[in-house]
Structure formats: C-alpha cells, structure tokens
Image (spheres, coloured by chain):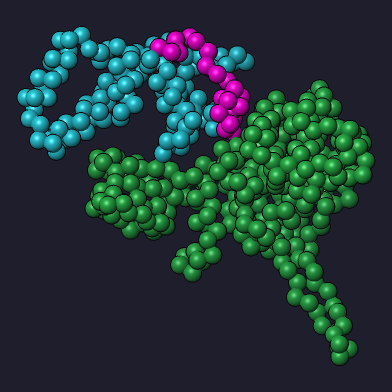
Chain colours: A cyan, B green
C-alpha cells in the first residue's frame, strides 16, 4: 500500500479523494482516525494527520472536535469540479499526444468518442468513470 | 492509568572516547594507546512525544548515543539533559541522567543484548522490570509474550535469538517509559514477528504517547514509522531533522534522456541509470513547483526517494571526496 512515487501523505490524501469521488465515502461519513490509519498501514500517525490537514484545507474533510474527521458536505461536488477542470490537461492531452504519435487522425478519435458515448458507456458525470480517469492521470 | 508526560532530550557538544589507556611496553617505557572516538562533538535535540529513527552504519555511534540517554554511559565531554517538557514548552526541568534515579526510572533502554537474567525464569526478569518502572503494565507484558509465543516459565538462556529480542520488545513496550529506546531490538526476529512488533509500537504509542527512539539497519521496513530521523556517521552527527525534511534531500526524474538531462540542469546527480532511451537520475535537493510542472509537461516522472536510498547515499564513504 502507498508504494507510489509521491510522499505517503500525498498518496493517503489521494486515496481519500478517490473514495469520496467514487461514493465509497459518503458525505458526513466518518473517516478512519489517524491512529487507525497508522496501525492499518504501518505509518507514523503524524503522516496520516498531515494528509487529513491538507484535506481539511481543501474542504474535503472537516473535524468534529473530540469525535473525528468527517467527509464535508459538498465534498464530492467540489472534487468533481476540480477533476473536471484538470481532466483535459491531465488525462485527455496525454492520450491525444499518444494518438498523434501513432498517427491516428483526430476524426478517428472523435468518431470513437461519439460511438462510445452513444453506446451508453461510462459518462464523465458518473463516479466510476471519474475514478478510472483519475487513476490514469 | 495515567500516561506520564513524554521526555525530550538534548545533547550538547557530546564527546565519548573509549579505550584511552597507558600501558607498559616490553622495554619498560609507558605508551598511551590510541583511543577510539565513539561520538565526536554531537549536538542534537530529541523532540518529546515523537518516534525518532536513529540510523547509521556499523560503528556510527548509535548505541553509544542511546546508552548516554539511559545513563549506561557518561560522556567524556559535553552535556546530556532530559526530562518532560513544561507546559510552556520549556526545558528548565531537564536533568543530567547520570546517577539520577528520577530520570533513569523514566527511561527504558532495550539493548540488543537484552539485559535479561539468563539463569532465572523469564517471569523473574519481568518482576525486576516491574519494580523498576513506575508505569509498568503487567497485562500488556503478558499479552505481548503470548503474541510473540514466549513462555515466561522458560529461562532466557533457553530462548532463541529472535525470542530474546521479542522479550526485549515486550519489556520496552510494557515499561511505558516516557523515553523508550529500542536499540536494534529486531535482531533474530522473523519477518512476521518484526511486523507484529512495529504494529504494537504504533498501537501503544497512539494510546500512550511517549518518546520513542528506534535504531535499525532495516531502514526500508521502519522508515514509515519515523517522524524524526537522526543519522550518525563515524561518530559525527550527519543530520537530525524530520523524516519529511530528509525526504526532500533528493528526488528522481525518470523519462526520455534529453528531457531528463534538460530538467536536471545544474543539480548534482547522485545516481544515474539508463535503460534504452529512458533515463532515471537521482538528484540532490527537492524540486520546486516550476520544476515539477516542467517535468509533467515533458512527460518526465518525478519521484521521491525512500529514506533507505538517501541514507545509503549520505553515508557513502566516497561522498566526502566529491562534496
């Protein structure tokens, strides 16, 4: 767990964002405590606390004194908005660069997108579609 | 059960020299043997309530530093002071641990040797520690021995290396000392036992906050436990900082050779690997936001380095010549 190239607290924050986006963590739902995080993933509790502090600043989590951390109301919507903004630059641009490299004409790409869309494939406003895209980025 | 305030510690200009002695040679003259300097002008602070990793190659001075804190040793020069932080964050109440019962009863050093009464039942050793440590938790000791599958009716002499280490881990945790020091306590433990030990440290640390010092050569296994890191090298302090700060001492770039070279710029290259057209360089320092954005734009992956890698590079004997 958390074997990526980024610092662990960044990866923890990313994991929680993904869970909120996917709906695995509902708004107003309590997230694991720093202690549970520490013992579950064998990390220093301060590392988990740092990830949580960042998510509080982003408005994804909020703290109930003496109780713990909860998913903020509107957190998912905020994350969807943020990821939508980043989608074209972070996800689509590299994919289109790859298409250029392979000599796939833009019309073919466009046709594929429209066909997929028409076939009722995952749409961008569905949570599972978003997490997939995000993992690719 | 109340949890006592965690202890902090501070070393100032500490020198520890071993083995300086005069001896008579065959012709009757007196010579002075070269002494070994185990610690050389070491100054550092150990933050209370934090898990600090103590890293260093063999003979770096880790055990000497830890023995000073537990008053098993006295410095040749310099001062050692420890105690709980006052409510205002002051260190006025800190004292020299040497021959100081108040300090030493609050410090539990577990050495690799174990410090067990070999020829008596293990339960006798545990009774001894229970008497010495005001915050001893007998239930926790019993539970941990059970977890590590150690029979307290056995004599320590009959235990394997790994089981002796498990007893050391048990004593260190059950003592609930405001300063708890594990000096290579993992030796001989198999991997599942080591992981159980790490889990128990984290669980008990969360429930009973205290200051923990942990030295280990298995850096990869334990680096995530640390909030602070001390690196000693040949008796000198190489660094004492947060694990996060240490993590910013180096980073890697992986991608097409030309882009990687351009992004590396003037930074010092610590390591370089090439696989076909893909290059990975390890660079000194941390990337700023501009560099990170430039890397992303160029399709170059930016990576952090495990403390293990940084430790190896920082203590590389060849490093001194080039830096």
* Residue at image coords 79%, 63%: B76
Quarter where residue A36 is shown: top right
Q: Nearer the viewer, residue B57 or B82?
A: B57
Image position, residue B258 (x, y; %): 24, 53
Q: How many marks?
A: 0
Asked if residue B77 is among those painted magenta in the image, a careful observer would answer no
Q: Nearer the viewer, residue A129 or B97?
A: A129
Is residue B168 visible in the rendered image? The answer is: no
Q: Quadrant of the N terminus of chain B?
A: top right
Is residue B321 visible in the rendered image? The answer is: yes
Q: Is residue A34 left or right of residue A61?
A: right
Quarter where residue A25 is shown: top left
Q: Is residue A133 above or below residue B17?
A: above
Q: Which residues are magenta?
A: A23-46
Q: Is residue B52 left or right of residue B73?
A: left
Image position, residue B125 (x, y; %): 89, 38
* Residue at image coords 20%, 9%: A120
Q: Nearer the viewer, residue A58 or B189?
A: B189
* Residue at image coords 47%, 65%: B323
Q: Is residue B103 above or below residue B1?
A: below
Image position, residue B322 (x, y; %): 45, 67
Quarter where residue B147 is shown: top right
* Residue at image coords 80%, 69%: B19
Asked if residue A41 is among those painted magenta in the image, a careful observer would answer yes
Image position, residue B112 (x, y; %): 75, 48
């Amino acid at each position: 767990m958390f074997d990526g190239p980024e610092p662990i607290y960044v990866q923890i924050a990313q994991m929680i964002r993904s869970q909120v986006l996917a709906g695995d963590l509902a708004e107003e739902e309590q997230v694991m405590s720093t202690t549970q995080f520490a013992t579950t993933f064998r990390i220093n509790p301060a590392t988990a606390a740092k990830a949580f502090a960042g998510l509080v600043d982003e408005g994804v989590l909020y703290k109930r004194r003496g109780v713990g951390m909860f998913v903020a109301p509107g957190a998912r919507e905020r994350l969807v908005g943020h990821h939508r903004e980043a989608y074209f630059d972070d996800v689509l641009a590299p994919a289109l660069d790859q298409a250029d490299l392979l000599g796939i004409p833009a019309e073919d790409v466009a046709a594929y997108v429209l066909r997929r869309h028409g076939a009722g494939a995952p749409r961008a406003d569905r949570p599972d579609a978003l997490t997939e895209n995000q993992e690719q980025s | 059960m109340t949890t006592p305030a965690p202890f902090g510690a501070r070393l100032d200009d500490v020198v520890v020299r071993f083995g300086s002695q005069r001896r008579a040679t065959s012709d009757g003259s007196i010579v002075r043997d070269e002494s070994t300097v185990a610690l050389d002008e070491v100054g550092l602070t150990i933050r209370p309530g934090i898990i600090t990793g103590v890293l260093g190659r063999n003979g770096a001075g880790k055990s000497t530093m830890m023995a000073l804190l537990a008053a098993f040793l006295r410095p040749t020069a310099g001062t050692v002071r420890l105690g709980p932080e006052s409510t205002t964050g002051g260190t006025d109440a800190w004292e020299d641990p040497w021959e100081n019962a108040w300090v030493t009863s609050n410090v539990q050093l577990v050495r690799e040797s174990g410090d067990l009464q070999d020829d008596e039942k293990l339960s006798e050793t545990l009774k001894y520690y229970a008497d010495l440590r005001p915050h001893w938790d007998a239930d926790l000791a019993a539970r941990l021995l059970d977890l590590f599958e150690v029979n307290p009716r056995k004599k320590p002499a009959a235990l394997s290396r790994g089981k002796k280490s498990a007893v050391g881990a048990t004593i260190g945790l059950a003592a609930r000392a405001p300063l708890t020091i594990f000096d290579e306590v993992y030796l001989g433990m198999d991997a599942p036992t080591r992981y159980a030990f790490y889990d128990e440290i984290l669980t008990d640390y969360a429930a009973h906050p205290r200051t923990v010092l942990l030295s280990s050569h298995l850096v990869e296994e334990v680096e995530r436990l640390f909030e602070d890191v001390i690196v000693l090298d040949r008796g000198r302090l190489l660094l004492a900082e947060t694990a996060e700060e240490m993590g910013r001492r180096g980073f890697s770039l992986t991608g097409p050779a030309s882009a990687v070279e351009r992004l590396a710029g003037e930074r010092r290259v610590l390591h370089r690997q090439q696989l076909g057209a893909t290059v990975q360089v390890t660079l000194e320092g941390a990337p700023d936001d501009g560099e990170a954005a430039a890397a992303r734009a160029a399709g170059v992956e930016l990576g952090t380095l495990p403390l293990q890698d940084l430790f190896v590079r920082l203590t590389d004997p060849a490093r001194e010549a080039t830096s």
